[in-house]
Amino acid sequence: MNLSTIQKRLFAWGMGQANDADVDRIKLIDCPEYQSLGELKRALLGNAQHQVLEIGPGAGASLAYYPKDIHWIGIEPNPFMHQYLEREAQQQGLANIELRQGTAEDLPVEDESIDTVVSTHVLCSVTDLETSFQEIKRVLKPGGNFVFIEHVGEECGTWTRKAQDSINPVWKNLFDNCNLNRETWKILEQVGLEKVNYYQFKLTIPLVSPHIAGIVRKKPVAVG
Ligand SMILES: C[S@@+](CC[C@H](N)C(=O)[O-])C[C@H]1O[C@@H](n2cnc3c(N)ncnc32)[C@H](O)[C@@H]1O
């Protein structure tokens, strides 16, 4: 077993343990609409309908928040996550699930077939952010939503950003290509999805504190 395989196994095990974390205790700072990460996840994921595609679902930390009658497709490149995902889906009463091996940059999903694409703490890790957004847009039905909760880089010039920039090379090697300092919002703004809800806030966890979250929509087909 090589180092990368050991890391991926360990990461999957760690994410599996984290499923039991009480995210209602993770408080949001500077977010007047929602008090905790749990409240935010219930608000953003609780209305997903029909065909839901989650990219990088890890061990399934978001599965508890979906309505039970959706058809959920998970695209998870780390094969060691899959057993945790299946167990979590069963525990959460999600019967209609499909797991596919793949990446956000090359989604194994047909054009315009998905009602909601979900990403929580994944865009920090993808290899190519721009291509991932283009893929998300491709698979969404017109009028479909992209729902996201992501940690991002702090404003340039701040102490937090300086710390993120200096620790990032080591951090991303330790945590499966997770980048602390990505300016994800800048790329999102260029993709041509329209904002429905958009939140910027902080968590009380150092280095991964700055966050963006919300819903952006693919334009519906014009009628008439
Ligand atoms: C920090 S974990 C987050 C897992 C889960 N979304 C959550 O909120 O607990 C990042 C996840 O993104 C996945 N990932 C990494 N690179 C990816 C890529 N290029 N495409 C899709 N998923 C990716 C990892 O395998 C991992 O499951």
Image (spheres, grey):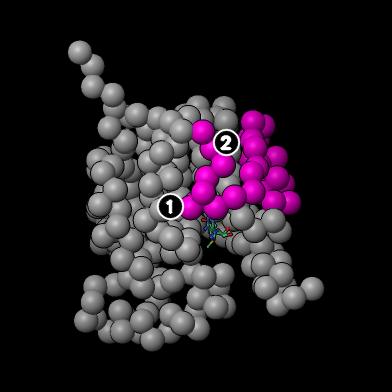
Q: Earlier in the sequence, mark 1 or mark 2?
A: 2
Q: Nearer the viewer, residue 33 or 6?
A: 6
Q: Residue at x 55, y 78 (%)?
A: 173
- 142 vs 86, left or right, is left
The magenta-colored residue range is: 82-110
Can residue 49 be seen by looking at this rendering?
yes
- 134 vs 8, left or right, is left
Residue assigned mark 1 = 132
Q: Quadrant of residue 166?
A: bottom left
Q: Do the residues bearing badges 1 and 2 touch, measured as CB atoms within 8 Å?
A: no
Q: Residue at x 20, y 13 (%)?
A: 224
Residue type, numbered disc 2? Trp
| SS category of the residue bearing label 2 | strand
Residue assigned mark 2 = 72
Residue 18 x, y percent position in the rendering: 60, 61
Mark 2 closeness class: few <14, some 14–19, many ≥20 residues within 10 Å: many
Q: Residue at x 50, y 83 (%)?
A: 170
Does residue 42 show up magenta in the picture?
no
Residue 82 x, y percent position in the rendering: 69, 51
Residue 192 x, y percent position in the rendering: 26, 44
Residue 69 x, y percent position in the rendering: 57, 27
Q: Residue at x 43, y 31 (%)?
A: 112
- 16 vs 204, left or right, is right
Q: Nearer the viewer, mark 1 or mark 2?
A: 1
